Amino acid sequence: MNANRGHFPHHGFFGTARAHPRRQASCPGPELLESRCLLSASSIEIMPLGDSITAGAFAWGEASGGYRLGLYEDLRSDGVTFNYVGSQIDTLSAPLIAVDETHYDGHPGYRADELADNLLGVDIYHSGNNGGHWLNGTGSRPAVYPNIVLVEAGTNDVLENDSASEVSSHISYLIDILTKARPDADILLESLLPIDEPQFLPVVQQVNASIRNTIVPEYQHYGFKVTFVDEYHNFVNASGNVISSLLYDHIHPVAAGYTLMANTWAAAITSVLKVSTPTPATSPTSSVYLINAGGTAPYTDHTGNTWSADEFFTGGADSDVPYTVPDTADGIVFYDRRTGTDFSYNLPVADGTYTVELFFTDPTYSTARQRLFNVTAQGQTVLSDFDIIGDGGGKAPITRAFSVTVTNGRIALGFTSVLNYATLSGIEVLKQG
């Protein structure tokens, strides 16, 4: 699949986060995390999630089990008791089979957005996904609630010649679903490994910079437990050149490379678990508003969150021409739109500070600068000459988020045309603090 299917640089795609039950560690206090307790708790579940590198693709005879075998050995030697979870079962690694730690979700050939599509649904572009629903389960496989998710994704996106911004959007989409579906989990997001081919390596480096400097900090800003794990530098020397002997086909590690990956994962996991003092488990703030702009009736999305019909607006018109919206099972939220030369929203709220996230689609135009408009919040311009297509959106949604401080009981949003109609697909408002 070569289409660009992910355009979700912000966290709010699914609206309000919901807590999910999971097996509790035998620790004092259900909402506390404490280092020694976690390090000995039998309830720790780790989900290896990714593509063929997570599966452990190898030069025959070299590395059965990939990094998962070395990680198991490293964590057990550190006194960490845990179980792997996932929809797949490893039938190749005799040591992992012997200790019954064979579960994982490493799917060869899968792009980051295709991995995302199988977490709560079924990706239609691949077979071998075990029926999808890797997190929420199927009739024959229960839901899983991992404490830690190890995310290795994006290599196949690069190999399909996607741009760095497209790959970053796919990865952000994947993290978006993980953080919303399992908000209490620690998400460890690794850098892409180098691809030892000149046409791909610069893209890998750009994506890694985006993961480290943009994606991870943004999710952390919203209270999600997302951590950057640098695996790239295991495979380059002090001069930054790729160590070719660690990649048997320019892409997949040899046994020594998987060992390096295992050591890095183990250090990251141990760091996450070793909280120096008991700390409350965190979860994102609930949404104050989820508004389906242009919608005429409430809509409950596939995660169970309800978007209200369009409300608190002045001006503009409803537009509800259905089309297949990429990367979502909830297309109605995005093809319903409010459009016009000048429209506004006045949302009643208690005084305080809020995060406002706006959702945009443009199914009408296919080239940049065909639709331009300005957006204001509390009378101040937050988007000027905003160009949905030029900024990477289109039929697939993009989002923009900003903070507002309310002192008069209202969040005032304005949308004014510069060229052709202004348009809006949805609004999410979250209380800060």
Image (tube, rainbow, N blue to C red):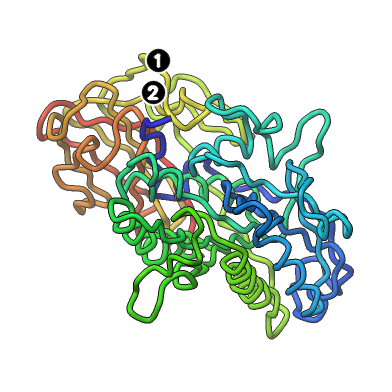
For the point 41% across and 50% down, the residue is: 10
Front residue of 406/33: it is: 33
Which quadrant holds residue 424?
Answer: top left
Q: Picture coordinates of residue 318 (x, y %)?
A: 33, 19
Local crowd at mark 1 within 10 Å, few (<14), some, or many (≥20)?
few
Q: Amino acid at mark 2?
A: Tyr
Per the image, label 2 sits on a secondary structure element best described as helix
Local crowd at mark 2 within 10 Å, few (<14), some, or many (≥20)?
many
Above or below: residue 253 compared with residue 337:
below
For the point 27% across and 40% down, the residue is: 392
Q: Which residue is mark 1?
A: 322
Front residue of 255/65: it is: 255
Per the image, label 1 sits on a secondary structure element best described as loop
Q: Which residue is mark 2?
A: 335
**Side of 395 where 39 appears, left or right:** right
For the point 33% across and 79% down, the residue is: 239
Comes first in the chain, label 1 or label 2: 1
